[in-house]
Amino acid sequence: MKNVEKLIDGNILTIKVALSKEFGPSTSGKSIVIASSEGNKSVPGKDAIKIGLNIYKKK
């Protein structure tokens, strides 16, 4: 994952992203990637639950 911090407390998942970071243009080139799960990923300890996260801004 890029710029994604996860914290699990019981049944609560908290996701933290630094909005000041950038990772360059998206594949299409239309936006700038700020954070990504880089596809669907399992929640640690809960394999049946998935995260799919993309945070971006227009170029």
Image (cartoon, rainbow, N blue to C red):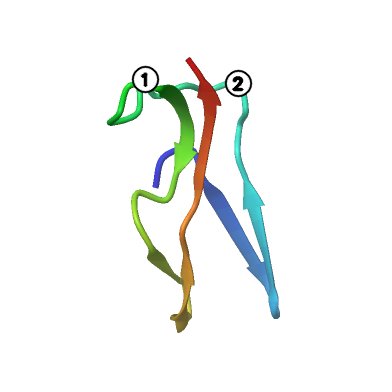
Q: Which residue lies furthest to the left in this view?
A: 27
Q: Distance between the residues labelled 1 and 2?
A: 12 Å
What residue type is disc 1 on? Gly
Badge 1: few (under 14), some or many (20 or more) residues near its Cα, within 10 Å? few
Q: Quarter-wise, where is residue 17 in the image?
A: top right
The residue where tag 2 is placed is 20
Q: Which residue: 48% across, 80% down?
A: 45
Above or below: residue 22 compared with residue 52? above
Is disc 2 placed on a helix, strand or loop? Answer: loop
Residue 32: x and y in percent read 44, 22
Q: Residues within 10 Å of mark 2 (few under 14, many from 20)?
A: few
- Image marks 1 and 2: residues in contact by CB distance under 8 Å: no
Decide if residue 20 is on the left or right side of residue 2: right
Quarter residue 11 falls in: bottom right
Say which mark, if any, is on residue 12. none
The amino acid on which the numbered mark 2 sits, given as a three-letter code, is Ser
**Regarding mark 1 in the picture, which secondary structure is present there?**
loop
- Which residue is depicted at the point 46% across and 58% down? 52
Placement of 52 over or under 19, stated as above or below: below
**In the displayed image of the protein, which residue is found farthest to the top?**
59
Residue 44 or residue 52, whichever sits in front: 52
Residue 58: x and y, percent? 52, 20
Does residue 6 sit above or below 32 in this rendering?
below
List the residue tagged with mark 1: 24
On screen, residue 26 above or below 11: above
